[in-house]
Image: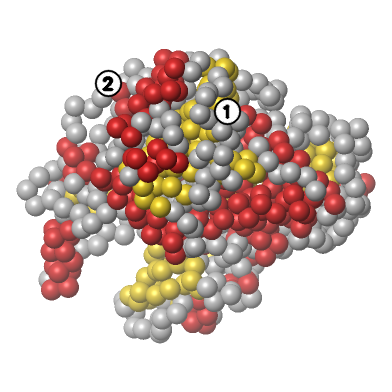
Amino acid sequence: MFRLGKRSFTKFKEQIAGQGVPSVTRIGQGISRRSLSSESTLPESADVVIIGGGSAGCNTLYQLTKRGIRAVLLEKNKLTAGTTWHTAGLVWRLRPNDVEIKLLASTRKLLMSLEEETDHNSGWINNGGLFISHSDERLNEYKRLATLGKCFGIESHILTPEEAQEVFPLLDPAGFTGALYSPGDGVVDPAMMCTALTKASVANGGMIVEDCSVSEIVTGENLLGVRDVRGVVTNKGIIRTNTVVNAMGVWGRDLIEPLGIHLPLIPMKHAYVVSETMDGINQMMPNIRDHDSSIYFRIQGKSICMGGYENNPILLDRVPGDFHFGLYDLDYSVFDTHIQGAVKICPEFGKAGIKSTICGPESFTPDHKPLMGPDPIINGLFHNCGFNSAGMMLGAGCAEQLAKWIIHDRPDLHMFAYDIRRFSPKQKKALNWATERSHEAYAKNYSIVFPHDEALAGRNFTVDPFHKQMIQHGAVMEERHGWERPGYFLPEDTVVVQPYDWYGYYDYPKNTNTNYEEALQKDYTFGFPEHHDLIGEEAHTCRQEAVLFNLSYFCKLFLTGSQAKEAADWIFTADTNKPKGKTVYTCALNKRGGVEADVTVSIVESGQEMPKRKRSKSPNLDLIEDGFDDELDSNVLKSSNLSALQWGAEIVVYATSMNSVNLAR
């Protein structure tokens, strides 16, 4: 990353008061090897400042200090405050995609090795996990999970109800149709885990400051006109730094909104209950997920912790800043649906009393994935929040990738599904859109993950001028990056996406027109969808006749200048030296030769008037982006692929791609 030179700490303090220009430090400039308590003074500078002392913050501190980075963690109260302290702590191994399986494996590996590294128990218990099925379709999903897990060396077994009862004797085999058993799953105690992580971090030179609230992230503007991080202001003083990690969980929006940064992060109440001691329960019995009933069991000694994801969670505007270790009263009118599902598979649970209830705030996102990676507006600001009640099982794996992101400018794994830049600026600013989508993602968290699923919430967010005409001609719309686009066309019918009905809750009536939902359900399969042949006919028409492609919803980058040809040869895999009007389909590579995006490149007439939307402030760079509203990804500007080239105004290359905003990263 581009960084300004180091200046005096005095000038930095003057800038906080409205004078001068602050100084910065660089990755690798050390701070003393000692821990800071709530009574200690702050260091003058740090390589990285992490804000938030929950699972995300402690894991990030560990991963950075392990790699020699001098990092400081600031917690406004005590470690684990917020959501971490009351989490159920479940850790599963099987997920429906390879990236998440690898992230979970990283977490599990760390939890199993922390005690040897630190002489402190990490709180990890390897008691296994059971996935309960109530239908053949769900069992087929489990078989797919088992097959994928086998590719990664994860042991799992498909069980009959009777075999599942042998593993968990209190299950009623008449209450379900089958199960998936994963003996490597487990549970972790969040306080013990954070203690072990911070012990290792301090030994590696990290610092922890509790009772330290951050009131401001100080930013400046570098020589390219891009805003960057300069430091943080706290109730204990000022720390100079280039890099800040937002690990503030449910408070992840609050501190950064004054900087003009918006996150699609929605706090909600999330709950579980703890049963009285139950005969027949012991700690080494497996945890349970009943996806069809949307519930889970977490074994805690001789008790069962039971929770789940209801269709009508209680949505929160903001969580008070002093709600450190607070809990809410449990609303049984919302939670009762989980008890019914739990009793169906485990009748003994219904006979046991409830010893305690846990209802606390959790942060949720529009696609039930964390918000991670570099902020596109401010250089040096990274996000690691919005874990959707999965911070224990994803925390270590995500922190490892974030540490590499910070140090090497990119992670090892393909983290686009977690990258904050997967949302457009327009989406991030739209609180209503984020609330709708986050509600649906919460309610569908345990739904079967079909390849062709489409959201019902937050639709018609952005439409193009041909939207109505396409609907009239039978288009079944899909949503990508906030844009409505046709997936395929029905020859003799029209279906219209309806306003989101919130599943009939919160005083919203359920939609009576369900034609669109019914059309989608025909494609909810792991095999060939019902519309497979219809889509095939469209593909053949493209090959054999004439078609019109609407590219309104694609991101567009205009590459101009006297060396545009050399830039295209450097970035793209295909030969783009074609006549004007020719379009080439190609991959765009990053500086390491990895594939960053697949795009089409069109050569247009030199001197053609370009959109006057965005231009960098660099005198040597003329890069115009269209299709992403108000925000130009600063990573484009700092890429070594582009910044070394000089630009004029003779040749134009036109590229379109949903992900091409990242093509030069």
Dot 1 falls on a residue whose secondary structure is loop
Q: Amino acid at mark 2?
A: Pro
Residue 550 lies, with reference to residue 35, above or below; the image says: below
Give x and y (percent) for residue 447. Answer: 35, 40
Crowd around label 1: few <14 · some 14–19 · many ≥20 (10 Å): some
> Could you give the CA–CA distance between mark 1 and mark 2, rounded to whole angstroms?
43 Å
Give x and y (percent) for residue 449. Answer: 35, 47
In the picture, the quarter occupied by the C terminus is bottom right
Q: Is residue 402 left or right of residue 655?
A: right
In the picture, the quarter occupied by the N terminus is bottom right
Closest to the camera, between mark 1 and mark 2, is 1
Give x and y (percent) for residue 565. Answer: 48, 81
Which mark identifies residue 509? Answer: 2
Q: Residue at x 52, y 73 (%)?
A: 594
Q: Amino acid at mark 1?
A: Lys
Q: Splitting the image into 4 quarters, where does residue 109 fall?
A: bottom right
Q: Is residue 211 visible?
A: yes
Residue behind mark 1:
302
Q: Residue at x 35, y 76 (%)?
A: 584
